[in-house]
Image (cartoon, rainbow, N blue to C red):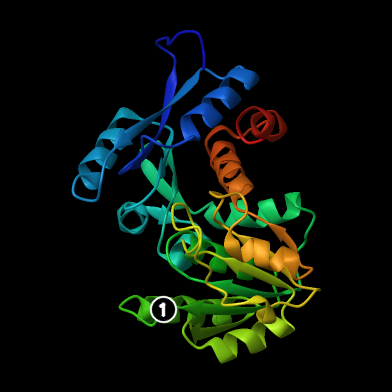
């Protein structure tokens, strides 16, 4: 963190509830320090009830940019003056840039996943991806994967109250991209197995398997995997979920969601500052254990 705040110091921040656990302040403030930028990143516990009021305050004060986490991402998409293509399709915003009072919303969660896959040594362009879950960060991954050139995307989601919303997103992606996107009920295990046996990549975007419920796996057993399948999980606590362990033992290559957090933050950082975050330094200091 910078040594002192001056009259020239610019503020960036995170709005969400809860936010006390966030690693974003360490990550962004370290990057500001390393690049000699007179900026500070703070967190504020703000939920949907007070989000509009908080955002108008940030707009009025000329705060350059801010992040949104749960439960604010969908409401922020309604508040913004402009939206990136990914945010417009997803109906969600996790990053806002304030240009002289004009708020433009972006979603960098999907960029974070795609970059974490690249960091692990994989290029999803032209590949067949199966995605489990399409809520929260899952929606952003679904949209970004299609925009970035995944050729086929089979998404499995709960057939609940949010199902029509996912249907609309899938419809838009099929209209606007060259990706063939199909939506399935996540309880249809027969379709899931068929899709996985044809797929190149699998990503679990649901919280199933996250601590403390580490004995759970959204994939029932190893018969769903084949050795050419790369299996990923946005969950990073534990570092290896039951699903990833099962996939690894079945001969699949695997990676978790830890660096997705790093790269979504790096994308936000660049939108605000026009500079690349020193990701290798930040990774070594805050992500490598």
Is residue 45 positioned above or below 128 on the image?
above
For the C terminus, the quadrant is top right
Residue 206, given in percent of the width and then of the height, sits at 48, 65
Residue 8 visible in the shown view: yes
Q: Is residue 269 left or right of residue 222?
A: left
> Which residue is depicted at the point 38% across and 83% down?
159
Q: Is residue 122 left or right of residue 73?
A: right
Residue 124 visible in the shown view: no
> Which residue is depicted at the point 53% across and 68% down?
217
Helix, strand or loop at disc 1? loop
Q: Nearer the viewer, residue 196 or 4?
A: 196
Residue 107, given in percent of the width and then of the height, sits at 49, 54
Circle 1 residue: 158
Residue 33's quadrant in the figure?
Answer: top right
Is residue 57 positioned above or below 48 on the image?
above
Q: Nearer the viewer, residue 43 or 132?
A: 132
Residue 135, given in percent of the width and then of the height, sits at 43, 66
């Amino acid at each position: 963190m910078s040594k002192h705040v001056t009259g020239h110091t610019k503020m960036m921040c995170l709005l969400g509830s809860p936010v006390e656990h966030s690693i974003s302040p360490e990550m962004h403030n370290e990057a500001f320090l390393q690049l000699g930028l007179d900026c500070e990143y703070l967190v504020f516990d703000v939920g949907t009830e007070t989000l509009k009021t908080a955002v108008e305050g940030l707009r009025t004060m000329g705060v350059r940019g801010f992040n949104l986490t749960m439960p604010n991402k969908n409401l922020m998409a309604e508040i913004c003056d402009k939206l990136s293509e990914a945010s417009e399709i997803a109906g969600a915003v996790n990053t806002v840039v304030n240009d002289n009072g004009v708020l433009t919303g972006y979603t960098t969660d999907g960029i974070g996943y795609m970059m974490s896959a690249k960091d692990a040594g994989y290029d999803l362009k032209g590949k067949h991806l199966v995605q489990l879950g399409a809520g929260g960060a899952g929606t952003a991954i679904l949209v970004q994967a299609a925009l970035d050139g995944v050729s086929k995307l089979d998404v499995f989601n709960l057939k609940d109250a949010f199902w029509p919303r996912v249907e609309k997103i899938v419809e838009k992606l099929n209209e606007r991209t060259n990706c063939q996107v199909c939506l399935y009920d996540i309880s249809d295990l027969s379709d899931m197995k068929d899709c996985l046996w044809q797929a190149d990549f699998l990503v679990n975007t649901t919280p199933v398997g996250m601590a403390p419920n580490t004995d759970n796996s959204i994939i029932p057993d190893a018969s769903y995997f084949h050795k050419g399948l790369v299996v990923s999980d946005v969950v990073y606590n534990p570092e290896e979920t039951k699903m990833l362990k099962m996939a690894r033992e079945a001969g699949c290559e695997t990676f978790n969601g830890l660096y997705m957090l790093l790269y979504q933050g790096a994308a936000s950082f660049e939108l605000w500052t026009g500079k690349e975050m020193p990701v290798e330094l930040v990774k070594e200091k805050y992500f490598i254990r």
